[in-house]
Image (cartoon, helix red, strand yellow):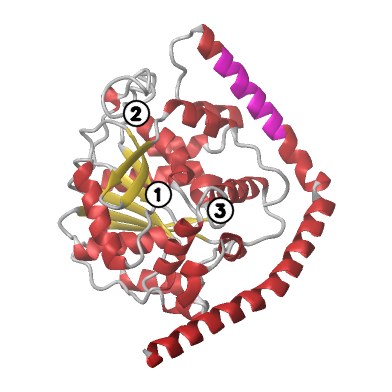
Amino acid sequence: MKGAFSAPGDYIYFKSQVPLHKIPIGTKQWRYYDFGPKVVPPLICLPGTAGTADVYYKQIMSLSMKGYRIISVDIPRVWNHHEWIQAFEKFLDAIDVHHIHLYGTSLGGFLAQLFAQHRPRRVRSLVLSNSFLDTCSFSAAMPWASIVSWTPSFLLKRYVLTGIRDGPHEPFIADSVDFVVSQVETLSREDLASRLTLTVDAASVGSLLLSDSLITIMDTNDYCAIPQQLKDQLCERYPGARRAYLKSGGDFPFLSRPDEVNLHLQLHLRRVGVEARPDLVRSNPREGNGGGNPSEKNDKQEDPDDTSKDDQGTSENSSAQNQPPLAPETSESHSLDGQLDNAKIWHLGFMKKQHIVSLPTQILLQVTWEIVSLHFMPLYMGTMYIILNNSWKFRQAV
């Protein structure tokens, strides 16, 4: 969250290889990635309030190489949980997907549980990370929820970002925070308002027909924006669920600890009967139907035990396993390789310096932001009160 942001080299490569889909369904605009063999039942990733479809790019690239189909979606502009259930069902019908496995983090995990409760025939399993069962505590902490749809974009972004722990982080956690902050900057005021509305709209997860054995709860042990009490309630609700604990990872372990998260996701999919098809992985992800996978280089699927051992190896080996092989060499591919190498080198050098160089600038911006917020928020809230009060008086007079 400090200094200028530079997109990671592996994310640049991901964007060059995996197509982003945008389709209108009714009044909703859906933005998503769909990558992997279509014959495999998909794992659909649902982000939290601050996330987009892009935050799961490490899971898409790694698991698709092993023969799994991964779909990552943006939460569309819906304003209550009933509307979410209907919109998501229409989305699944539009992309011709019937039986799904859901991986949801934070708000995404809550929405995944609601969908599993109301559409039990479609959901085969759940992976919940840093999630919760009801919205009571969030609505109590946000007394201005009734005017969230009128709140300016900069205030909504500030409110979302204040939920992310600031301060000194381990480098890999700091990188994950920077990436998510850059994604928040891409969200419109309506997107943020709808997600915050879903967070505070009165709702709770009822009993699921899904067996606890088909649920995996994946949490971090260091810190998280979701209170520990809410995470404990989730574990108590599903006593027979598998537990997957990460020693560290912060709010976004799918970015900060991708190898461990991918390992747990792979183990979950195997346990619930999803059979990977590495034989259908393609040499070029942009060839063939439905975004086939990066290459046939990994036809021999790695065992999860081997993957966990590789985590202790060199960073070069880890990078080589997570990166899909390059497409056939052309003059354009040579140019792209050069750009990616330069981006990676520049990014690594910049990340080492940014926390030192940008400290005075960050302090100045923080102070300025606080002054502006303190002066204009009371004025804005007073204006809203006057408008609502006069509107009520006018309706009584009429």
Q: Does residue 192 appear in this view?
A: yes
Q: Quadrant of residue 106?
A: bottom left
x, y percent for residue 285? 37, 23
Who is closer to the viewer here, 272 or 134? 134
Give whichever of 386, 299 is nearer the camera: 386
Write the residue at 80% across / 58% down. 363
- Amino acid type, label 2: Gln
Q: Which residues are magenta?
A: 335-348
- List the residue tagged with mark 3: 249
Q: Is 150 covered by the magenta stretch?
A: no
CA gap, disc 1 to disc 3?
22 Å
Residue at image point 78% right, 40% down: 353
Q: Label 1: state its secondary structure.
A: loop
Asked which secondary structure carries label 2, the reply is loop
The answer to whether residue 353 is left or right of residue 302 is right
Q: CA distance from mark 2 to mark 3?
A: 26 Å
Cα–Cα gap, marks 2 and 1? 29 Å
